[in-house]
Image (cartoon, grey):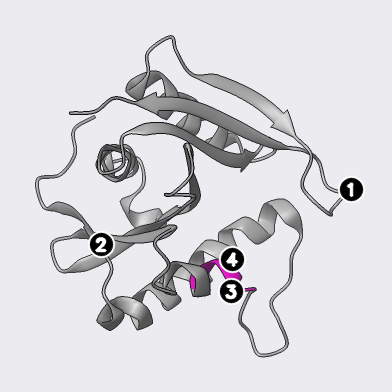
Amino acid sequence: MTTPPDVTVRPVTSADRPTVERLWLLFRHDLSEFRGQLPNPDGTFRGDRLEAAFSGSEDWAAYLFSRGEHPVGFAFVRALTEPTRVLNSFFVVRGARRHGVGLHAVREVVSRHPGAWTVAFQDNNPRAVRFWRRVGETIAPGAWEEERRPVPNKPGLAPDVWVSFRCPSP
């Protein structure tokens, strides 16, 4: 699978916020299938991570993925000032999936912040399970780890699966 040549990954700007907010709704809608979450009364989903990504904090970074002129996804990174960075939110629109966009985007994002990384996903999301295991093996062949951790403050939920790997410096 090759990445289309017109896929770009770039840091978001304040002008990108409306676009990322719309993508955020699609992301949260996709995740609602696995956590049974319903939208707020106004049709939105929780937005604390979206707010943090646009807060200007040195601990957070947000990236927008585009294919030509079309926005196709985003990534929010947190813990940039910590020893292990967290790929906090990651999304590719359905029309761009299975074309190498996601793997290309992950590689671009983590290469901008070399070092230790971790990302959580849900075991009951088979596409995420395959994707994140492939990411671990692609970025750190034979040297990535997977573990299950309880979801903080949500004892009724199944544990999250965490994949951890190290992105070498260029």
Say if mark 3 contacts mark 4, CB within 8 Å: no
User: Among all residues in the image, which is located at the extreme left?
Assistant: 5
Q: Is residue 63 left or right of residue 30?
A: left
State which region is magenta.
46-50
Label 4: how many residues lie within 10 Å, few (<14), some (14-19) or many (20+)?
some
- Where does residue 133 sit, x and y in percent of width and height? 49, 25
Q: Secondary structure at mark 2?
A: strand
**Observer-nearest of 151 and 23:** 151
Mark found first going from the N terminus, 3 or 1? 3
Mark found first going from the N terminus, 3 or 2? 2
Q: Secondary structure at mark 3?
A: loop
Instruction: Give the vertical position of 62 relative to 143 (above or below).
Output: below
Label 1: how many residues lie within 10 Å, few (<14), some (14-19) or many (20+)?
few
Q: Amino acid at mark 4?
A: His
Q: Which residue is mark 2?
A: 11
Q: Secondary structure at mark 4?
A: helix
Q: Which residue is mark 3?
A: 47
Label 3: how many residues lie within 10 Å, few (<14), some (14-19) or many (20+)?
few
How far apart in space, not on screen, are marks 3 and 2 (Cα)?
19 Å
